[in-house]
Image (cartoon, rainbow, N blue to C red):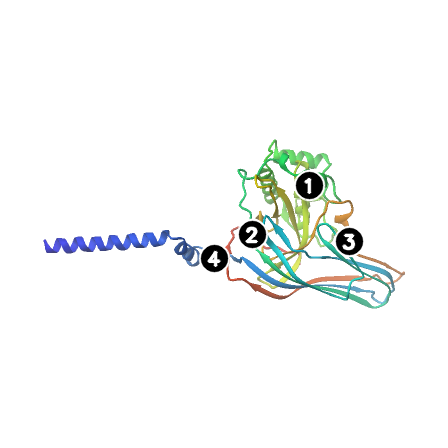
Amino acid sequence: MALDRRRTGKALLVLSVVLIVVLLLLMPPTQDLLRKYLVDPLSPHYPEEVRMEISRTIVLEANGGHITEYEIDLPRARSITEAGVHLQTVTNVEVSPTYDQYYDDELYDTMVWEGQDLFGSTSVNVTTTVVQTLHRWELDDGSVLEREEVPQSLLDRYLDDEWKIVVDDPVMEELSEDIVGDEDNVYLIARAIYDWIDANVDYHVWTDEDEPLSSLETYERRKGDCDDQSMLFCALARAAGVPAWLQLGAVYDRTTGQMGGHGWVQMFMPTDEGGTNVTIDIVNDNFLIWMPNLFCEYTDTGEEGDLVEAYHSIRVTYSPGPAPTVTASYTVLSYEEGEGQVVLSCLAIREDL
């Protein structure tokens, strides 16, 4: 009998230990630790918040010739808040030399430097201190409404042809219809276009192109870089009756410490709470995710000539002789990650460096 009691006591003890372990495993803090050290060690971890000091430099060189007149236009980064979330917070901007003109635009600000009779070189530097916060929009076809709920102001601004965003073309219209069908839900429309581009268009940097490809050219070639694919997305979305537009800036590569120019899509998703602008970064496989290594300088206004001017921000006239050159670069002067870390799957950073 004493032996049976001891066996029963040991069994109860083991059962109690098992129950305690199971309860501990079910607790969120324990699951987070297991995920961090056992499940996710090979998955990329990303900071919830990043503080960066970014230097953007433009150098204009006459190359022994004579630049009779020049104008350099650069956007000044703004803070970005969507649905109460501070995605990008600009805390300081230093400019050298002081700009000659400044335009307070609707969605971005522009600094302008002007000059004449340049025989040597001149440079412009803008240093921005910014805090970026990772954010994932928890939206789906149940929380996002139909396209009829998109504000008319956005429909008026972002549905037509715009420079390389070719919408009014039989090929684009037919392709959009094939992808979207008769779907009205804005989330499902965006997701269908995103998935089609992800599956059918390869990432490729065109070294022999001075401008981005048009949406039609990217479709025909089935490959393109970040802004090529973003413009294709915008064209297909607009053809489906859903506004979508470009944001331009840069992206930071944590593995190399380098930052290069980048472009992605912004669009509006209506909800019962009013709706929000979301981020779609096709080439980096980020659907409805704002990454903390993004740096936005420019948001397309949809106004005629606005987007093309953003791509041709340096205008030069010069006398017969050697052609001037322009060198543009981003340099990250400081980079500091916050303590919080998250795991995002299927992320492949590809910058235009």
Query: How far apart, in angstroms, are the residues tagged by discs 4 and 3?
Result: 42 Å
* Residue 103 seen: yes
Q: Is there a contact, CB below 8 Å, between mark 2 and mark 1?
A: no
Q: Residue furthest left?
A: 1
| Location of residue 37 in the rendering, given as x and y in whole percent from the top left corner | 42, 59
State the quadrant of the C terminus.
bottom right
Mark 2 vs mark 1, CA separation in Å? 23 Å
Precedes in sequence: disc 3 or disc 2: 2
Q: Amino acid at mark 1?
A: Leu
Residue type pointed to by label 2: His
Q: Which mark is residue 312?
A: 3
User: Earlier along the polypeptide chain: callout 4 or callout 3?
Assistant: 4
Residue 173: which quarter of the image? top right
Q: Which mark is residue 154?
A: 1
Calculate the distance from the C-alpha at mark 1 to the C-alpha at mark 3. Answer: 25 Å
| Dot 1 or dot 3, earlier in sequence | 1
Q: Which of the two discs, 2 and 4, labels the residue nearer the N terminus?
A: 4
- Write down the residue under mark 2: 135
Disc assigned to residue 209? none
Note whether 226 is above or below 321 in the view shown.
Answer: above
Badge 2: residue crowd in 10 Å (few <14, some 14–19, many ≥20): some
What residue did someone put label 4 on?
42
Question: Secondary structure under badge 2?
Answer: strand
151 above or below 207? Answer: above
Q: Quick check: 46 left or right of 353?
A: left
Q: Nearer the viewer, mark 1 or mark 4?
A: 1
